[in-house]
Image (cartoon, rainbow, N blue to C red):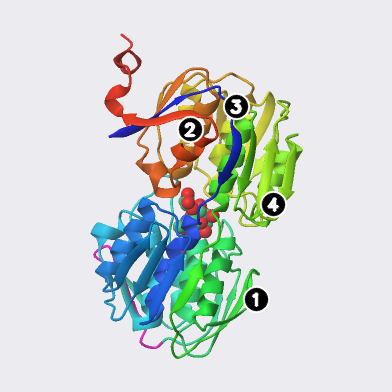
Amino acid sequence: MDVLRIRGGRRLQGVVEVSGAKNAALPIFAATLLTSEPCTIRNVPDLSDIRFMADLLKRLGAQVERLDPHTWRIQAGSVTHRAPYELVRKMRASVCLMGPLLGRLRRSSVSLPGGCVIGPRPIDIHLKGFSKLGCVVDISKGYVEIDGSRMAGAEVFLGGRHGSTVLGTANLLMAAVLTPGRTRIECAACEPEIVDLCRMLEVMGARIEGIGSPSLTVDGADSLQGCDYAIIPDRIEAGTLLLAAAITEGDVTVRKMCASHLTALLDKLEEAGLPLTVEPTQVRVRSNGRLRPVDVITHPHPGFPTDLQAQMTALMSVTPGLSIITEKIYPSRFMHVPELQRMGADIAIDGANAIIKGGNRLSGAPIMASDLRASAALVLAGLAANNDTWVQRIYHLDRGYEKIEEKLQALGADIERVDQSAIPESLLDPA
Ligand code: EPZ
């Protein structure tokens, strides 16, 4: 198995480009099931999660072709309704197949994905929404069996304890675009990935009003057509690269991003004293080495994204002073903290708060990635540490960051993918 070896302490410098958004591409791939016509999807990131979704679509009967590393052609001429556990368990986002299957076939049988390391991730709100559309929902033998033979437009409220639900909104939208009558979705997620899905559905002929707002109105169509659609840039990758520049006191321009999707992060970086030059599609970070601690609370969009919380925690752990990072979306999403502590970070967890006494110079060590964004945080910590860091279980990273080590190398980082046998024995068993 591969690991990442990072020799920290290099200041990142240069220009880097962001790939397409994974979390937009996954529901958009699912949406291709809504039509029997071909859909060409562009600016797709080259990631293992995308390949999982492509495999699922093939299993459901679609013809799936990768025209080049970032362009896919999908044609779901005929489709079956059952997504099996062996594929669904590999990727939680598979739950967003339910909506398009219901739209297209009025029937869906999708395995429940099982546990997730970032905390409980129920889909009760998705199911409540489908029930409002007239579906009969039953959970049997690990599968969610949904009968949508009496589906009709309705008023659906998608708010929960932690705000709206991103994939729940995607699911309800994809069901509603082919459901007779008018559906009003209240407390819809406003994430840019949902806006992107709406735009793609519009190109397919769907009628949606209120795009980008928490109140969406969908007038169901009889059928949808194929499309040619390019996915938005990945705001979480862009944010991670900006934070990599900050943690190495670098001078980096992140290009092909959408600055308006990251206002909350940019605001925090400015509050932390980081000089930024912001243009619509690129942001330059030019560190002056004088960061201040900031408090951060994660919220649904346009608030600070939970998917950048771990990376921000890494930055604050090297920033002199006290900061508190509060996680409101997944209150136990702190799996990165024990690993950062192994590197010398001074962080205490109190409920949903990480209390960080920042400023310690981190010391590289073999560390274990637990999920996608935790892995990114550990890479950032490694870039700032004062000797070799070995990040293990990097398959998590490959789910969501395209060629991350190549992008960081191009900015001057000393990072390489090596076999885990390269980790010095003395570090694994110092005795
Ligand atoms: C999406 O997950 C993203 N995944 C996640 O990114 C992201 O962390 C999350 O949104 C929040 O922004 C994809 O887009 C593929 P939610 P999703 O439903 O839609 C609770 C990454 O690293 N909830 O918006 O599954 C839930 O437990 C990943 O790229 C219910 O209680 O998240 C959470 O506390 C990880 N019942 C909150 O709502 C429900 O039925 C928000 O979850 C649904 C959700």
Residue receiving disc 1: 210
Residue receiving disc 4: 263
Q: Is residue 111 visible?
A: no
- Measure the C-alpha gap from mark 1 to mark 3: 44 Å
Residue 255 in percent (x, y) is at: 61, 49
- Measure the C-alpha gap from mark 1 to mark 2: 39 Å
Q: Quadrant of the N terminus?
A: top left
Q: Amino acid at mark 1?
A: Gly
Secondary structure, mark 1, is: loop
* Sequence-first disc among 2 and 4: 4
Residue receiving disc 2: 378
Q: Observer-nearest residue: 68 or 30?
A: 68
Packing grade of label 1 (10 A; few <14, some 14-19, many >=20) is some
From the viewer's perspective, tell me whether residue 42 is left or right of residue 141: right
Q: Contact, CB < 8 Å: mark 1 with mark 2? A: no
- Name the mark nearer the viewer: 1 or 4: 4
Secondary structure, mark 4, is: helix
Packing grade of label 4 (10 A; few <14, some 14-19, many >=20) is some
Residue 224 in percent (x, y) is at: 45, 84
Q: Contact, CB < 8 Å: mark 1 with mark 4? A: no
* Sequence-first disc among 1 and 4: 1
Q: Which residues are magenta?
A: 139-150
Q: Is residue 382 visible?
A: yes
Residue plotted at (27% across, 62% down) = 142
Q: Vertically, is 393 above or below 48?
A: above
Residue 130 in percent (x, y) is at: 44, 76
Residue receiving disc 3: 11
Residue plotted at (49% across, 82% down) = 177
* Sequence-first disc among 4 and 3: 3
Q: Contact, CB < 8 Å: mark 2 with mark 3? A: no
Residue plotted at (56% across, 42% down) = 240
